[in-house]
Image: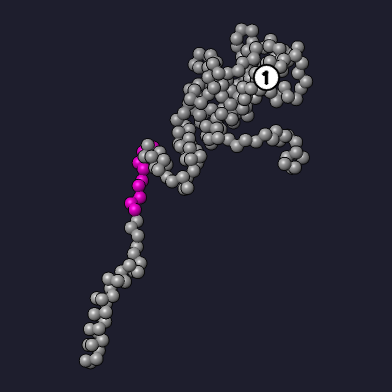
């Protein structure tokens, strides 16, 4: 019995001596930070901006913010204004100067004005590329008379519905009086949804073997 008391005393003494020295080796549960729950759209935007880039890239952050505001935007916010549109007149000759102007614009579809200043139709540069165009050929010879319109105060969701409904990829934008105030392409709309689009020069999607051998 006396021996056991001595052992207990020794263990108590040893614990007092070694305890503080062993503290740093003991596993300590890390403190869990309080989770911040955004309550408004502004709060969420603030959180997105604070997320480290190794967790969420700048491009992904931009896509999320674009998606958040997509339904709030109007066609007028992203359309190409009338003053920046490259028009072709129905009687224009499709010579080198006109073609050079079209290709340099970066677009592939161009509205054609009639003799009264209205929209007579659309010219597609892909069609021009597939045909032998002479200097004496006028724009009227390559005219696609099918034109689609959307109003400038459409939401982008309504604009997307219009693109899907018509299977078109080019719309003239009008105001409430029917006057042309801009244009919108499907590419412009998708870019607003997804950010920068991947570059791809392949244009033989209608050739099964060309697609198979890419």
Which residue corresponds to mark 1?
100
Residue 189 vs 51, above or below: the answer is: above
Q: Whole-percent x and y of residue 176?
A: 49, 16
Residue 106 visible here: yes
- Residue 39 at what x, y percent from top left? 35, 41
Tell me: residue 23, above or below residue 83. below
Which image quarter: residue 26? bottom left
**Is residue 28 shown above or below 156?**
below
Q: Secondary structure at mark 1?
A: helix
Please, which colouring scheme is shown?
one colour
Q: Position of residue 158 (x, y in %)?
A: 52, 28
Q: Is residue 146 above or below residue 55?
A: above
Please name whichever residue, 21 or 199, is drawn nearer the observer in this view of the structure. 21
The answer to whether 138 appears left or right of 153 in the picture is: right
106 or 44: nearer the eye? Answer: 106
Q: Nearer the viewer, residue 199 or 19?
A: 19
**What segment is highlighted magenta in the picture?**
33-41
Whether residue 39 appears in magenta in the rendering, the answer is yes
Residue drawn at point x = 54 percent, y = 22 percent? 80
Magenta stretch contains residue 203: no
Say whether residue 161 is left or right of residue 98. left
Q: Quadrant of the C terminus?
A: top right
Q: Is residue 150 visible?
A: no
Q: Position of residue 88 (x, y in %)?
A: 64, 15
Q: Main secondary structure of the magenta part?
A: loop
**The quadrant where residue 121 appears:** top right
Q: Quadrant of the N terminus?
A: bottom left
Mark 1 neighbour density, 10 Å: few (under 14) some (14–19) many (20 or more): few
């Amino acid at each position: 019995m006396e021996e056991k008391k001595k052992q207990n005393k020794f263990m108590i003494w040893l614990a007092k001596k070694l305890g503080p020295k062993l503290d740093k080796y003991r596993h300590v549960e890390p403190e869990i930070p309080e989770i911040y729950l955004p309550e408004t759209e502004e709060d969420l935007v603030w959180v997105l901006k604070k997320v480290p880039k190794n967790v969420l890239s700048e491009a992904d952050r931009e896509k999320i913010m674009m998606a958040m505001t997509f339904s709030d935007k109007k066609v007028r916010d992203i359309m190409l204004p009338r003053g920046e549109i490259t028009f072709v007149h129905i009687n224009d000759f499709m010579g080198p100067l006109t073609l050079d102007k079209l290709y340099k614009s970066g677009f592939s579809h161009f509205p054609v004005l009639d003799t009264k200043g209205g929209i007579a139709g659309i010219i597609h540069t892909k069609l021009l590329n597939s045909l032998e165009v002479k200097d004496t050929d006028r724009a009227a010879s390559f005219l696609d008379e099918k034109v689609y319109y959307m109003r400038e105060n459409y939401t982008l969701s309504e604009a997307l519905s219009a693109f899907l409904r018509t299977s078109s990829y080019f719309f003239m934008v009008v105001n409430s009086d029917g006057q042309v105030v801009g244009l919108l392409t499907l590419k412009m709309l998708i870019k607003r949804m997804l950010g920068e689009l991947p570059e791809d020069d392949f244009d033989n999607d209608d050739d099964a073997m060309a697609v198979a051998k890419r």
